[in-house]
Amino acid sequence: MTPSAAPEGTLRRVQDYMVPIATIRVAHPDDRLTDIAVRPTRGRAGHTLVFDDDRLVGLVSPEAVASGQTVSRATP
């Protein structure tokens, strides 16, 4: 397969699609959902990254963060 015939996705790099970390809302395990729901995001609202000190320990869905929503707790 020649480069001109290669599917576009095979020529793209992750950096072409990544979302800068500075645009993602972050939280800590003990934060309340209502508190993180009002934190501004600098970009499209999506998942909230959860850090315990400097270690990424999980994420919270936008549905869980939305005020007034009832969602199930995550299970491992």
Image: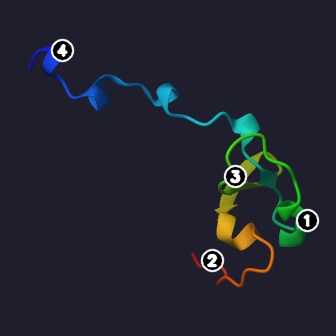
Callout 2, which amino acid? Ala
Q: Secondary structure at mark 1?
A: helix
Q: Residue at x 88, y 66 (%)?
A: 31
Mark 1 to mark 2: distance in Å? 19 Å
Q: Secondary structure at mark 4?
A: helix
Q: Residue furthest left?
A: 1
Q: Secondary structure at mark 3?
A: loop
Mark 3 to mark 4: distance in Å? 36 Å
Report x, y in % for residue 30.
Answer: 87, 68
Which residue is tagged 1? 35
**Chain-order first, disc 4 or disc 2:** 4
Residue 25 higher or lower than 70, as above or below: above
**Chain-order first, disc 1 or disc 2:** 1
Q: Residues within 10 Å of mark 4 (few under 14, many from 20)?
A: few
Which residue is tagged 3? 45
Mark 1 to mark 3: distance in Å? 15 Å
Of badges 1 and 3, the one in the foreground is 3
Residue 45 higher or lower than 66, as above or below: above
Query: In this image, 70 relative to 2: left or right?
Result: right
Q: Could you tell me if the residues under marks 4 and 2 are in contact, i.e. CB atoms within 8 Å?
A: no
* Residue 67 lies in quadrant: bottom right
Q: Residue at x 67, y 82 (%)?
A: 71
Q: Residue at x 85, y 49 (%)?
A: 40
Which residue is tagged 2? 74
Mark 2 to mark 3: distance in Å? 20 Å
| Residue 73 can be seen in this image | yes
**Chain-order first, disc 1 or disc 3:** 1
Callout 1, which amino acid? Asp
Which residue is tagged 4? 3
Of badges 1 and 2, the one in the foreground is 1
* Residue 75 lies in quadrant: bottom right
**Chain-order first, disc 1 or disc 4:** 4
